[in-house]
Amino acid sequence: MSHANHSAAKGLRLRLLEPLLHFGFALTGIGTVLLGSILPRLSVQWHLRDKDAGLLLLVQFATSASGALLVRRNLWKALACGYGLMGTGAICIFLLQQKSLAAFGVYGLGLGLAMTSTNMLTGRRYPQRMGAALALLNFSWSAGAVACPLLVAQFLHHATSSAAFAVVGLLALPFGLLPLLADRSDLDASTRAGSAPPGMREATTILYFATLAFLYVGMEASIGNWMSTYATRATAWTFAGSTLAVAIFWAALLLGRAITPVILSWVPERVLYRASVFATIAGVLLLLAAHRPLTILAGSALSGLALAPLFPLILALFLEEIGGSRNAGWVFAVAGLGGAVLSWLTGAISSGTGSLRIGLMVPGAAALLMLAMISRRRTNGGAKQQAVLEPTATGKI
């Protein structure tokens, strides 16, 4: 009887674990875009200049990027530490207010640990259907990112902007207990690496794709984090209205990720890549030319849809070339730095020129550089360039 009870309890724990991993990952999506969503209100509340706000974004994204390098052997321990640091940092931001720069570092580090370890754990737990499992997991992240601006708009009717961090922190802390639900055999899960390209080829491949990932994440973060602020200035929109532009951007990104496998069944990867970069440039130009709310919304939608296929394409082509290199984590770490550096650079240029419209030329310049890089790269042979993002039987990556 005791054995039966033990088996039933174990089964219940494992059934709870999967949805809770997804809820936690959705919370990291909320946490990632929260600062950008409340930035107009927070800047007023804390009397921040654009370069000060950009510094907060820089600290959050830079420390988050380190998660890819800090997650090593014990993935469950990394997950627990990640949610613990995320929750602690968020609560300290609320308590310290304008003096919370270090707290943003703790918060960002927790986000990086939690997101990286959850992705790796999901891949480990579903080796036979890794693509579909990771696609569903990252859909949860995107759902949180899309919901964040809408939730914030309602929340700020009743509380200050910094109080939103306190709520996120209190919600994040319990997810640090998720390892208690895990199967004992998973607690010491470790990463494994297979074959990798030799020496210099490995280094140049990692550098190339790390640069592409840096530029992509930088574009996504710059547009997403500054969208609300830009909409309020470019169109004299209310804060509630400006959050709609942010929500449309993330919703378009989510929709684009969902339809990418279908598009790739008809269009080669490199053709879609170039088309997406061109469309990203068009979306940024539309935002720069906007003086009316409808133009802002159109630019947000086009930018989100255009950016959506880029990261899956970069990642798929990278994994195809690099094999099982133990240094692959550098690509993810450098990608996170792109969000930090280009978001900060956008704010710094805005402060220096007195125009956020000029600051938003940064993601446009990054898109032009991506286009130049892919145009100069040559394939290693037609037979090797088989599509790596073809739809599976379920239609998911």
Image (tube, grey):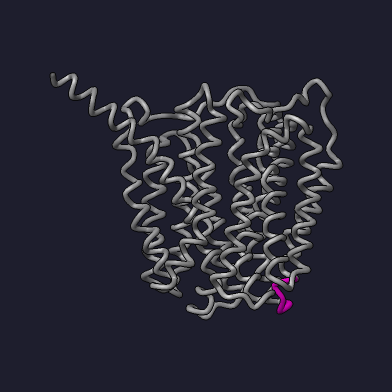
Image-based side of 179 in relation to 138, left or right: left
Q: Position of residue 5 (x, y in %)?
A: 18, 24
Could you tell whether 249 is left or right of 80 in the image?
Answer: right
Residue at 37% across, 58% down: 169
| In-image side of 15 versus 381 (left or right) | left
Residue drawn 70% across the image and 26% down it: 197
Q: Position of residue 77 (x, y in %)?
A: 37, 40
- Chief secondary structure of the magenta portion: helix
Q: Residue at x 53, y 75 (%)?
A: 43
In reply to whether residue 160 is colored magenta, the answer given is: no
Look at 51% across and 49% down and name the residue there.
143
Identify the residue at the far left of this view: 1
Query: Residue 275's image quarter?
Result: top right
Q: What x and y, as percent, mark residue 314?
A: 70, 39
Span colored in magenta: 353-357
The image quadrant where one finds the C terminus is top right
Q: Is residue 354 magenta?
A: yes
Image quarter of the N terminus: top left
Please tell me in which quadrant of the rendered image residue 235 appears.
Answer: bottom right
How far from the left and from the top, in percent, is residue 79? 41, 42
Residue 163 in the figure: left or right of residue 203: left
Instruction: Name above or below for residue 175 compared with residue 151.
Output: above
Q: Is residue 346 above or below residue 27?
A: below
